[in-house]
Amino acid sequence: MDFQQRAGQCSSAPPGVQAGAAYTGRVTATPRSTTHASPRRAERQPPWLAPALALAVLAWPATGHGADPSAAPAAASAAAMPLPAAQAPGPAASPASVSGTGQRIYADMQPRLLQVRTLLKTQDSQSSVGSAFLVTPEGHLITNYHVVSSYALAPQRHRLVYATVDGQQGALDLLAIDVVHDLALLKPADPAPLRGRGAVPFRPADAEPERGARIFSLGNPLDVGFAVTEGAYNGLAERHYLPTLFFGGSLSAGMSGGPALDSQGRLVGVNVAARRDGEQVSFLVPGALAQALLARGRNAKPITQPVHAEIERQLLAHQDGLVARFVGQPWRAAGHPRYRIPVPQENFSRCWGSGAPAGTRGVVFERSDCTMDSAVFIDERLRTGAISVRHETYDGSRIGALRFQQRYTASFDNEHMGGPDGHRVAAQCTERTVAAGGGLPMRAVVCLQAYKKLPALVDLTVLTTSLDGETTGVQGRLDALGLSLDSARLLTRHYLEGFGWTPAAPKTGSR
Amino acid sequence: MDTGRPEDRLALIELIDRDGRVRRTLDVHAWPVSLGRALDNTLVLDDPHVAPHHATLAPDADGLLQLQVGASRNGVQVGPRRLPAGTQAPLAEASALLQLGGQRLRVRLAGAPVAPELPLARPVAVGRALWAMLAAWVLVQAGHRWLRLDPGADFVEWLPWLLGLPTGLALWCGLWALGSKLFRHGFDFASHAAIALAWLLVWEVLDAVLPLAAAAAGWPLPWLAWRQWGLALITTLLLRAHLRQVLPQHPRAINLGLGLLLVAGIGVNGMLNLRHLGRVFNEPYMSALPPPALRLGGTVPVPALADDLPALHQALQQRAREAVLRDGDEDEPR
């Protein structure tokens, strides 16, 4: 809607995403709805830890380098120093020797840690790599769905293999996926080589680690080699619709699907994503979800057909729940003197505001972007499930009705509706002048976009603009990805009926 | 030999130049008339592609004028027909067009009916009307600029428009006037300026009225069509007017060519959109908004809009199915 910078809308990626792209190579796309939400801000969806080899990571500066010339050599030598010689791993490591705990955990867990590679059937070259870990003595493995998504979507073109720390290799079968929480359950085709390695124990559900407790994340970052990184447990990430643990440590591409363990070696969560616009802001899927997937899928038959129908089923269930919860809560007030504007509650969405610079001679506008952190990874080029709501209010009393009309129309024109891509056909729209709350006349455009292989799902865009003011107005846009038709209808009504006049709106002739 | 009395003239042979004008004429007082490069011909044609004795014109026993082609390698083109050496053909028409080598000749016979006088091409607008159109257009452009600038804008922000637009217009008209100079030997700047201004004004009026009317009534269709093809339509009409000024002798060819171009362009554009986007129009929705006072269409309740979605969904699913078929059985998402 930003009438001033049309070009900036879809092309400019936020700085955070660009940094992420430099880091992981493949994790560049954000859900469409947020791509043009607010180009200035670093606040983004976390990039998934898709495993690709981008050695830019080596060039990342360590904190403190260069800040103090005397400290720099010390820091550099510290960084270059080998880890302290292995001490006898005491059964109860003292709190002072944290790295000792890390060593013990790595020593205990490395037989249960694996690398999962997705290979192209025809040429035996890696199309992606990630990590996984044993959860049963018979060899069941947990990893992320996104590590095995190429296989899950096209099993006839790919195969899955594992590699252990000690160099064992073998073929893997995919048993079950939880696409919404980004988990997958695997089993080796021949369990013999993995027998006797034990399993990573799950934490009891009622025993949450304390905030700030050290936890240890294992995996094979960037295919460089198996590694353990430690960080702080920070509880659930706030305002995430999907339960996600906030891990205060570094995760790199390739560690996806690896386990994050407490100091007793029990599973806290599964490595899944990291934010590239911050430092040590990483995310884990709670271990209980992995446990649930294991319980559900441990006796399942191996998947040999594309899983689109299963993805569709899981997304529909998830999205219907999400939409029901979304429409179940009242809209938050935007605080506009004339218009009632629907703004989502902040319990699982983040809103960012911006506005025209103070003292502008032109139209005065305020803008709010709300995005819900509920995006679901389908494949490298497709994220779905996000809901975003944004609005702009305009006050053109300084420029007069004619000029206001020009800006206001240009802003309404400056909107992109989804074009065709590999997964979707182009959006189709319907438009009408509707009477929103209290009879407020609004032009409303509703567009749907269909998925080629997930036929029950649609992406919804509702674009609307008030028509009652000569020099004042509000324009809003809602994007919701991967919904059922019924949810789309529900959300359309809920959103448009959220607009209206405030009780205090001046009852002018135009009202 | 051109000394006879006009009433004794049997025919007139005209040598036509590349612009279709008569360069030389030959009064014919006696048949036969021989044509060729040799000096003993009645009409000497100095053209390397013409034979020394290329052709002869003489009436036969019935008084019908016959063309006898001599020892020529290239023969003679009579209208659409090419006559090889040694052949003979009657020149039936009252004024026949012959081509010998690179020379075009017209043979006009005495007694043949003469085409009526054509009116002189008049400039589209002259003097005051031209200046009035210019003033109207400049005012409209200034209005556009005013609308886009915030109040209190620096005068520098007007400069690109004030300098650029008149320069552009002058350049456009100048180029067309050069075309007139080339084909009609007159640098007809005023006529082209009048044509350009007239169509620019038509554009401005329609482009102001149509979207506003569509927005006021709440009808997306005319707005979508105008947004997509309006400019092409007006540009075609503008080109047609300029071309007819430059080449007044070919109105049908101009109409046909531009008409085909426009229809083909619109057709191809619409077809590609249908294929790519599943709709004829580029724009997914009408973005013109009516000012409150001009909002004539009524409103519908919100659920009515939500009720449009199932039909939309069905059409989309159909397209998705077609797309899957088109993509083939390749399961790798791309």
Image: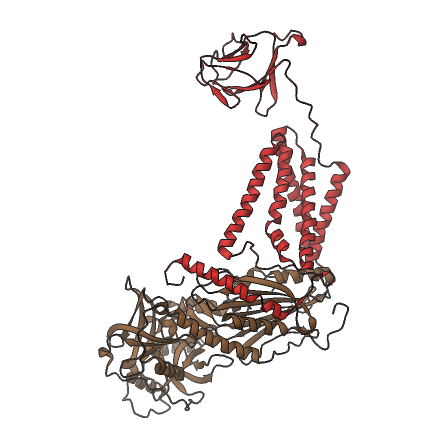
Chain colours: A brown, B red
Dividing the image into 4 quarters, which one contains the N terminus of chain B?
Answer: top right
The quadrant of the picture occupied by the C terminus of chain B is bottom left
Residue B84's place in the image compared with A249, above or below, is above
Task: Say whether residue A107 is left or right of residue A382.
Answer: left
Most distant residue in the left direction: A192
Residue B6 locus on image (x, y percent) = 67, 10
At horizontal 61% and vertical 22% (from top left) the residue drawn is: B21
Q: Is residue A151 left or right of residue A510?
A: left
Residue nearest the viewer, comparing B246 with B312: B312
* Residue A4 placement: quadrant: bottom right
Q: What is the x, y in percent for residue B63?
A: 57, 9
Image spot of residue A505 (x, y percent): 73, 74
Residue positioned 70% across, 46% down in the render: B201
Depth check, front residue: A378 or A109:
A378
Q: How many marks?
A: 0
Res. A452 image quadrant: bottom left
Is residue A70 in view?
A: no
Question: Who is closer to the viewer here, A314 or B245?
Answer: A314
For residue A456, above or below residue A238: above
In the picture shown, does residue B8 fall above or below A49? Answer: above
**Residue at position x 35%, y 66% in the image:** A154
Quarter of the image holding residue B259?
top right
Residue A369 lies, with reference to residue B135, above or below; the image says below
From where the camera sits, is residue A117 visible?
A: yes
Q: Tell me residue B333's x, y (percent).
A: 40, 63
